[in-house]
Image (cartoon, rainbow, N blue to C red):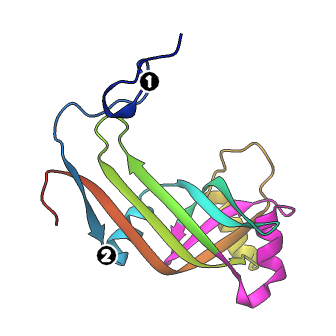
Amino acid sequence: MAARPAAHGRSEGSAVHAPEAGWPRHTVELTSGQALGLLGEVSFGRIVFTQHALPAIRPVNHVLDRGRIVIRTHGDSDLFLQARDHGDRGVVVAYQADVIDPLTHLGWSVVATGYCRPVTDPESLVRYQRLIRPWSDRMMDCAVHIRPHLVTGIRLAEGGGRG
């Protein structure tokens, strides 16, 4: 027997929970400085790059260092190989991170777009290996950095007004 549709098009028994109070929600646009500041407060996000001519997304750990997003990776990853193959030009990527409460639906989301290049300085690589602890058990002996050219973000807030 199929579940009957519930309010808002959800099926009974759905795992999606709507906030009980504080509706409606609205979005507040963040300045690039505010958005980059929030990105620096978290260590986990998603890198978006091209893999075999299609978009690919991978969860990764990062650190924000002098305005650059730094990610540890392994030397045979598609991301590292593309960044290395593009040399000083770099390869265009997007980086997204957010903190959104699953119950209240409040929080923020940031997207940074820019050029990804390999970290080539041995001292910097050693430093990043100390600063970034990958969540994967795979050996992450390389790193890439993204110099953001476009940083956008929104804050999901309570209330019906904008601003």
12 to the left or right of 132: left
The x and y percentages for residue 9 are 38, 33
In the picture of the structure, the residue carrying the numbered disc 1 is: 14
Name which quarter of the figure residue 88 lies in. bottom right
Nearest-to-viewer mark from 2 and 1: 1
Where is residue 145 drawn, in percent x and y? 64, 74
Please give the range of residues in magenta: 64-92
How far is the residue under mark 2 from the one under mark 1? 36 Å
Task: Tell me the SS state at disc 1.
Answer: loop
Please report the residue visible at 30 percent of the width from the left and 70 percent of the height from the top: 30
How many numbered marks appear? Answer: 2
User: Which residue of the protein is positioned furthest toward the right in this rendering?
Assistant: 76
| Quadrant in which the C terminus appears | bottom left
Indicate yes or no whether the magenta region holds residue 85: yes
- Seen at 42% across and 18% down, the residue is 4
Residue that carries the numbered disc 2 in the rendered image: 31
Q: Amino acid at mark 1?
A: Ser
Pointer 2 or 1: first along the chain: 1
Residue 21 rendering spot, x and y as whole percentages? 17, 34
Would you say residue 115 is visible in this rendering? yes
| Left or right of 141 in this view: 91 | left
Q: Callout 2 environment at 10 Å: few (<14), some (14 to 19), or many (20+)?
A: few
Quarter of the rendering containing residue 58? bottom right
Quarter holding the N terminus? top right
Is 129 rendered above or below residue 136? below
Q: Amino acid at mark 2?
A: Thr
Q: Is residue 40 visible?
A: no
